[in-house]
Amino acid sequence: MSIPRKIVVSERAALRAITDYLSLHKMLYIRINPVRPVGRQGAITFVPIGDQKGSPDLLVIGPRWILALEVKSSTGKQSATQKAWEVRCLGLGHRYLVVRDVAEVARALVTMPRGWE
């Protein structure tokens, strides 16, 4: 009898599924991508830009609230700069979540005040 293998979901796939979900439910959100592609010797790498290193992948905006979402793969971990951004965000009274799939986002949105409908 074989042991079932855990399914690993990439960050890119999780992010796509979450943005599709937000769009489907007509949520207002901003995709934050503070990197720029740089081509070096036939390969493309992504270099951080600006002073917002560690910013979350998505900001979901509702009536009188902001939900910051850091999307991770099923095995991904936050960097030190992402943890610092989380502390600043929470200190301003906003919600910040590290999410790995659509279900986590759906559960979080149920707890947010309604009013966009």
Image (cartoon, rainbow, N blue to C red):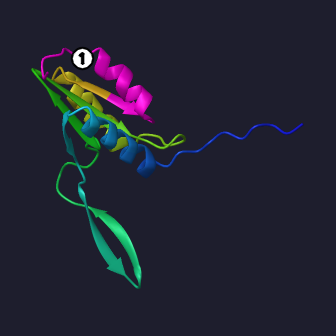
Residue 84 in percent (x, y) is at: 29, 36
Q: In this figure, which residue is indicated by the disc labeled 1? A: 112
Depicted 80 relative to depicted 111: above or below = below
Q: Is residue 88 left or right of residue 77?
A: left
Q: In front here: 21 or 59? A: 21
Q: Seen from this angle, which residue lies furthest left?
A: 64
Identity of the residue drawn at 81% across and 37% down = 3
Q: In front here: 113 or 44? A: 113
Residue 65 in percent (x, y) is at: 15, 22
Identity of the residue drawn at 53% across and 45% down = 9
Depicted 25 relative to depicted 20: above or below = above
Residue 61 in percent (x, y) is at: 16, 31
- Examine the image and state in which quarter residue 36 appears: bottom left
Which structural element holds mark 1? loop
User: Which span of residues is magenta-colored?
Assistant: 97-117
Q: Is residue 5 left or right of residue 18?
A: right
Q: Seen from this angle, which residue lies furthest bottom?
A: 41
